Structure formats: structure tokens, C-alpha cells
Image (cartoon, rainbow, N blue to C red):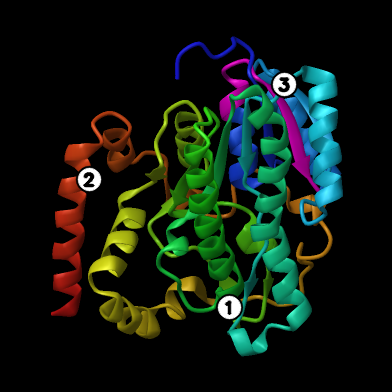
Amino acid sequence: MSGRPEREVVVVTGASAGVGRAIAHAFARRGCRIGLLARGEAGLAEAQREVERLGGQALVLPTDVADHAAVEAAAAAVEDEYGPIDVWVNDAMATVFARFVDVEPEEFRRATEVTYLGAVHGTRAALRRMIPRDRGTIVQVGSALSYRAIPLQSAYCGAKFALRGFTDSVRTELMHDGSKVWISMVQLPAVNTPQFSWCRTRLPDHPQPVPPIYQPELPAEAVYWAAHHHRRELDVGFSAVKAILGNKLMPRVADWYLARSGFRSQQIAGVPVGERPDNLFVPVPELASTHGIFDSRSRGRSLQLALATRAPLLPAALLGSAAALGLLRALR
């Protein structure tokens, strides 16, 4: 998009760690003014220092995104400090690694309220300000799991499916009104973040992202790109494309494959979880960081993303064909 201000005003939820913190870094490198929202004050304070070292400005706003009044108050504070919000990024998430029957109702509700309703509250706060001005962009941080659900993450998958449906609905309402406010969704692959060290889990072994794993800086750059281009959705990594297209082409094969491999692939074999704190209801400040524990196994680049953000039509056709071939091989 042309004509954007030199120092954009940006809000990032889930900014104390992981992809959210990396997103704050990405905007900071462009000199943006950023409202940092999350529950963990220690992680937010460190993120603020990093943003300022990178050339941006940051306002720390301890916020539980499951509380719509708190999100509204944070949005007002950002505009009081920095002026009109140009970009709002909904990234906050929570999850429980367990079979659905082993997840307590209050745990499922909490994961849903943070991951889904947190984005709904953020979108509402952003639109209340953007629609009257007829400008602004909202970016939802989604997942390939918003198209292809996997075992042991029913709450998270359900929330991401809901977020995609909600986003599509709001987008069409904005289009109907002829609004210049844009809403986009970035679908992530497996990412090396602290969530696997602080999520609530009932698995026997330590949770892990399903390989291939990417460093959080890659989706962060994708979010920045999506915030400045009118792309409806942007997929990150060939693995995300394969999961999305594969499920559209052969959903029953995907069910069969995940039933066989999905439990094993989400655990580090031989590394018991043991007793540990989790961040479902309260922050775990000592684990707040941008990267998780999988640096040695994570990728920092994606040819798919490079192609998708430069020449989107040809790569989409090529990747679709490759995904179909990959599924056929798996079926054999």
C-alpha cells in the first residue's frame, strides 16, 4: 500500500514472546511505534527494550486479551500516546496438549477465549477506530491448523478454524460497505517458540512442533508484508501449503495419516515432561523469549514465502501440484 506514514502506529497482541515478539521486532526495524499487549510484564519489558534498540518506540500494556474491556482500554492508551492505529496484529494464543477427553472444560474455555475471542476483541477495538477514518489494516495470525486440524490440539485447532470463519465474515462486511479498511490472515507452519515449554500438557513426553520447524522471524516478516499488501491470506512455508491443499484434495487420507503419526510427531521421544509451570491461566516470566528450544532444528528461510510475496500466481499453481503429488506418494 502506498502513502503509509513514515512511523506507523502498530498494536501487537501476544507480544511478550514467540511470534508476537518477533512481529514487534519486524515493525521496530521500520521505525514504527508499537503498543505491546500480553499478560507477562517481564516479557513485555524485555520486548520494549528490544524494540527501542531496533529503532522503534514501544508502549507496554499488560493486557489479558480474553477481557474485551482490557483490550479496548489498551487500544485507547495506544492512540492517546501515539495517535491513530494503522496496523493491528492479533497473535495472542494459548493451548492445551492433550486428548480432548482429557481437557477440562475450564481449560478448553480458556484456550478458546485467548486464541479466538482475544482476536475477536482485538478486531473490534481496531475496527471501532479504523472504520470512521476509513483506513487501517488488521492481520490475524492464523495457522495451517485453521484448515487441517491435528490430534492433541482440539482447543487450538477449533479456535483457529473459528478465527478464519470470523475473519472471512468481517472481510465481506467491509467489502460490502466499500471500506478501505483491510483484514488479512497469515497461516503459519510449525514455529520455534516457547509455547512448547510453557503450554499446559498431559502428554507423557515433551511437546514439540510437527517438523519442519521455522524460526519466528520468518512469519514475522510475512505479517509485516501482509500488513502492507491487500492479500486475502498468506501461507508461510511449503509445509503449511501442503497441509492446506492436501486437506482440500484428500481429507480422508490426511485423517488416516494423522491418526497414525500425529501423536508421535508432536512429542520428543524419551524426554518426559515432568512437573512444570504452564501459562494457560498465569504467565511464566522466566520462559518469555522470542525463540523456543528448537533452534538447532529450525529454518530461517522459505523459498515458498519468497515466491508467494513476489510472484503469487505461478508459485501457487506449482505448490498445489507439488502438494497433490506428495499426498499421492503418502497414500501409496
Indicate yes or no whether the magenta region holds residue 31.
yes
Residue annotated with mark 1: 205
**Which of disc 1 and disc 3 is earlier in sequence?**
3
Mark 1 residue type: Asp
Count residues near mark 3 (Cα–Cα under 10 Å), then give few for <14, some for 14-19, many for 20+: many
Count residues near mark 1 (Cα–Cα under 10 Å), then give few for <14, some for 14-19, many for 20+: some
276 shown above or below 31: below
| Magenta-tinted stretch | 26-39
Mark 2 residue type: Ala
Q: Are marks 3 and 2 in contact (CB under 8 Å)?
A: no
146 shown above or below 18: below
**Which quadrant: the N terminus?**
top left
Q: Is residue 183 visible?
A: no
Residue annotated with mark 3: 84
**Secondary structure state at the residue bearing disc 2:** helix
Gap in angstroms between the C-alphas marked 3 and 2: 35 Å
User: In this orientation, which residue lies closer to the viewer: 269 or 62?
Assistant: 62
Single out the residue that lies furthest toward the front. 177
Single out the residue that lies furthest toward the bottom. 101
Residue at image point 82% right, 65% down: 281
